Amino acid sequence: MLGGGERWDTRIRSRFFSEDYGRASSDRRSQYDNVINSFYEVSETLRAGVVGRYFRDSRDHEVQFLKPAAYWNPTPELNFGAVPNLDGDYRLNAAYRLSPAHRLNALYNNEVYSAWHTYNRSHSTTLQSGYDYSEDENSGRVFSQASVYIDGNFNNYLQTGLSYNEKDLGYFLSWNRILRPGVEFGVSAEERYRLFNEVDSGPVVAAFLRLDFAAVGGRLAPTDNRSVNFTRGGVAGAIQDSSGKPIPVDNVNFLVNGQRLPQSQSGGDYYLRDLKPGVYEIAIDEFNLPLEYVPVRKRQLVEVGRASVTEANFEVRVEYGAAGQVTDSAGEALRDVRVVAIDASGEEVSAGQTDQFGYFRLDRLLPGSYRFQIRQTDEQGERIVAERLVEIRDDFLFDQNLVVN
C-alpha cells in the first residue's frame, strides 16, 4: 500500500509464491497476484482513476488488465460507480437515497443484475429485499434479509435471510462479534441462499477469527494494520481506571481535532485509523460513556507518525451522586438550604442547594462513607442542625432525606 494525499489515493497489494511453495514437486510455475487501485478527486462530485491486476494461479490461469474507473455523485442523494472487479469485468452500480430511512440500489457484476431496497428501521435494525437475475443461468431469485445490532451495539450483530430461486428455498444465519479493535470472530450457516439453479451441495457452516495487533508503548495492542502505510498512522489506547485496568465499555466515540474520524471502539479499547503524520488533539466523547465514569482528563495532544501507531490512554474514575429532600419537623419543604457531603477525612467534597420543593442533589462522590450535613450560623457560632450517614458503593442514591429540627 502506498497511501494517499489531499486528493489522491493509491493502494497496491502484491503476493508471490515460488514454484515449489506448498507442493511436493516443482513442475508448476510460480504464482503471483498484484493489484493496483489509484484514484484522483477531479471535483467534489467525481473521482476517477485506474484499476489493474496481474495474476497467475497454480493452474496457469492468468488475468491481466489495467482499466479506467470512476465514481460520480451528481447529488448528495444519487451516486454511480463503474469499477473493474478482480476478473477485469466492470462492476456497475447506482444508488439513490429516497429518505434517511429508505435507499434504492442497482448493480451489475459478473453477469448478474441486482436491484434491492434497504430500510433502516432504527439504529439497531436494517431490512433489505430485492431480486437477482443471472444471465449465465437464465434464472433469478428473490431475497429478503435483516441485520440486527444486539442491544444497539454496532460491534455485536446478527444477520439472517431467506431466498427463493424458482425451485428451492434458501436461508442463511450469521453472528459477528468484535471484542476489541482488531479482534473479531463470527459463525455462519447457509444453504442455497446465493444459488440460482446450480447444484446444491448441502448446508455450509463456517467460523472465523481475526487477530490484528501492533506494538504500542511496549505492549501489543489490538489495532487494524490494514490502514497503516507510508503516509498514514494511527492512535490506539484504552479507557481505563487509575490502576490501568481497561473499563469494558462499548460505542464510546473519540474526537480528532473536534471531528469524528474513522475509528473503532469496543470493550474499552479504541483505535483511530488513517491519520496523516502530525500532532492531533484527541478527546473522549462522554455521550455514550456510562454516567458514573468521569474522565480525569478529557483531551490530550498526540503525535502520529508514518507507518506507526501511537498510544493514548484515557483514565476515568467512578463518581456517583445522591439526592433527597430537606424538611422541617412539621414536614414542610425548606428551600435555599445548603447541604454538604463530608468524607471520612473530614473534608467537604460536594455541596448542593435545595430548590423550591426542598430537593437537593450532591454529585462527584467517589465510593465511600459520607456524612450529609446542614449547618446554620447564629450567635453561638456554626452548628449542625441535620445530619445523615451515607454509604456510596456502586450506584446513585435517592431519598437521602434530612429533617431540620
Image (cartoon, rainbow, N blue to C red):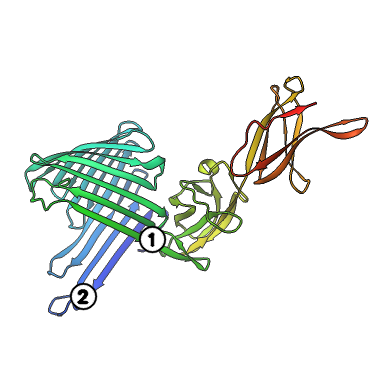
- Horizontal side of 14 relative to 308 (left or right) equals left
Seen as rendered, the residue at the extreme left is 138
The amino acid beneath tag 1 is Gly
Percent position of residue 85, x then y: 21, 54
Percent position of residue 286, x then y: 55, 43
Location of the N terminus (image quadrant)? bottom left
| Residue at the image point whose x is 33% and y is 31% from the top | 99
Seen in the picture, residue 315 relative to 163 is either above or below; the reply is below
**Quarter occupied by residue 369:** top right
Depth check: 66 or 19 in front? 19
Label 1, secondary structure: give it: strand
**Quarter occupied by residue 300:** bottom right
Number of the label disc, if any, that sits on residue 3: 1
- Horizontal side of 80 relative to 153 (left or right) equals left
Q: Is residue 182 visible?
A: yes
The amino acid beneath tag 2 is Gly
Label 2, secondary structure: give it: loop
Seen in the picture, residue 280 relative to 403 is either above or below; the reply is below
Seen in the picture, residue 378 relative to 58 is either above or below; the reply is above
Percent position of residue 102, x then y: 31, 33
Mark nearer the N terminus (2 vs 1): 1
Number of the label disc, if any, that sits on residue 118: none
| Residue at the image point whose x is 75% and y is 33% from the top | 339
Number of the label disc, if any, that sits on residue 22: 2
Give neighbour class at mark 2: few <14, some 14-19, many 20+ (Cα, 10 Å). few
